[in-house]
């Protein structure tokens, strides 16, 4: 059995003020009327089929997620509370093993764009074959084309296997979101890849590694696994989530395991994690402004402007992010785009939850 899991519970705080708790980034119809979640489902459906696609979200987003899925056979699973990617992966691995005896699981974020969908499907199919015969936990790596500081980096190791015409490599090192000078060195080195945040593994292999490197999470979800399919499943799931730490799969396991592998891919991958990344898909005017909505600029250059309703005007400015919605406006220097999430935290601290 092969299961595709789409992690769709995030809020996309770097995409504020468009992204809110009730309308997260991955559900916004930003690409020809389609959301990132819809595009992700379309991309992987030919490999897995609707019956074997699980979308994991949070309770506050469940209704909207189900509406976005629009297919009865794609299953929406609900996390009682967000605990980052390691608990989410433990949850789906335990559920897959409990329901199918074991399964091969491929985990995809809901907020990525991939231009070469067919090439991507070939990589995923080869990755499924590789992990089923090797026991490795596989991640996909992307050749960096710029020293981005918002991505994790993977240093390539030696060859560990092949499948589907692709070579799979070991992992020497994971580095999470390096400083600009370090990122530049990695790009110049040539042996580093961006971590695409896509993982393929057998459920039993993942859970065995969690027992070694994340024993608290493994223990909590082991009790949940025993309750899958019973009347106490939801109760045990809530108990597991309430008792585990918030930790990413990269930091908690992939940086420590000796069973990590990576396959370099060139499929036109992009992580739409910030306004800067999204701006690459907006129209460019003659002054280098990336614009969505109505914008009138005079001596304004190299700005990112997105207006959901209001008209935005700018005079004598450059290198700004200006985002306007019906109840909030963001103005930031472009180089501070990764820090928008800190602004969201400040809004919460000021008691402005209605804007979150």
Image: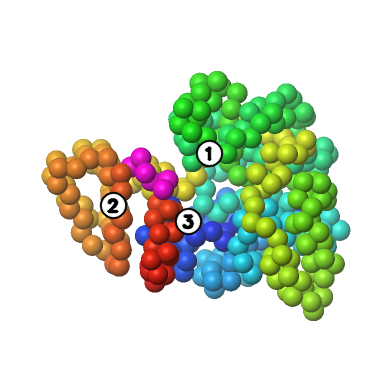
Secondary structure of the residue carrying numbered label 1: loop
Compared with 279, 84 (above or below) is below
Residue nearest the viewer, comparing 100 with 334: 334
Q: Is residue 41 left or right of residue 170?
A: left
Q: Residue at x 55, y 54 (%)?
A: 110
Q: Which residue is mark 3?
A: 12
* Above-or-below relation of 189 to 227: above
Instruction: Look at mark 1 in the image and give the residue it sits on.
Output: 177
Q: CA distance from mark 3 to mark 1?
A: 17 Å
Provide the secondary structure element on which disc 2 rests.
Answer: strand
Q: Main secondary structure of the magenta part?
A: helix
Placement of the N terminus among the 4 image quadrants? bottom right
Q: Residue at x 58, y 56 (%)?
A: 41
> Residue at the location (59% across, 27% down)?
192
Q: Position of residue 207 (x, y in %)?
A: 80, 51
Image coordinates of residue 138 in percent, x first then y, are 71, 40
* Residue sitting at x 17%, y 49%: 314
Instruction: Tell me the tag on residue 331.
Output: 2
Whole-percent x, y for residue 336 in the image: 37, 44
**Marks 1 and 3: in contact by CB < 8 Å?**
no
**In the rendered view, would you say 183 is above or below 22?**
above
User: Which color scheme is applied?
Assistant: rainbow
Q: Residues within 10 Å of mark 1 (few under 14, many from 20)?
A: some
* Residue situated furthest bottom in the rendering: 231
**Which span is picked out in magenta?**
334-339
């Amino acid at each position: 059995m092969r299961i595709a899991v789409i992690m769709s519970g995030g809020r996309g705080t770097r995409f504020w003020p468009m992204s809110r708790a009730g309308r997260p980034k991955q559900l916004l119809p930003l690409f020809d009327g389609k959301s990132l979640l819809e595009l992700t489902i379309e991309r992987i459906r030919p490999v897995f089929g609707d019956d074997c696609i699980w979308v994991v979200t949070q309770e506050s987003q469940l209704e909207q997620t189900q509406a976005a899925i629009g297919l009865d056979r794609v299953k929406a699973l609900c996390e009682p509370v967000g605990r980052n990617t390691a608990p989410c992966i433990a949850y789906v691995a335990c559920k897959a093993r409990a329901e199918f005896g074991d399964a091969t699981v491929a985990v995809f974020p809901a907020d990525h764009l991939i231009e070469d969908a067919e090439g991507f499907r070939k990589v995923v199919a080869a990755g499924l074959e590789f992990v089923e015969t090797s026991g490795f936990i596989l991640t996909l790596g992307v050749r960096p084309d710029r020293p981005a500081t918002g991505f994790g980096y993977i240093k390539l190791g030696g060859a560990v296997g092949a499948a589907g015409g692709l070579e799979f490599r070991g992992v020497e090192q994971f580095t999470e979101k390096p400083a600009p000078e370090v990122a530049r060195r990695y790009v110049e080195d040539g042996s580093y890849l961006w971590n695409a945040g896509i993982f393929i593994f057998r459920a039993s292999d993942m859970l065995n590694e969690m027992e070694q490197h994340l024993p608290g999470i493994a223990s909590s979800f082991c009790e949940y696994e025993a309750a899958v399919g019973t009347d106490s499943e939801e109760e045990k799931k809530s108990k597991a989530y309430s008792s585990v730490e918030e930790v990413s799969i990269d930091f908690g396991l992939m940086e420590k395991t000796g069973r990590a592998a990576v396959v370099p891919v060139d499929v036109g991958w992009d992580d739409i994690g910030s306004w800067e990344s999204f701006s690459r898909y907006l129209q460019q005017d003659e002054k280098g402004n990336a614009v969505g909505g109505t914008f009138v600029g005079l001596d304004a250059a190299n700005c990112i402007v997105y207006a959901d309703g209001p008209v935005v005007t700018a005079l004598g400015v450059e290198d700004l992010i200006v985002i306007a919605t019906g109840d909030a406006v963001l103005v930031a220097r472009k180089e501070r785009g990764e820090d928008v999430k800190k602004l969201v935290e400040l809004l919460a601290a000021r008691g402005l939850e209605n804007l979150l």
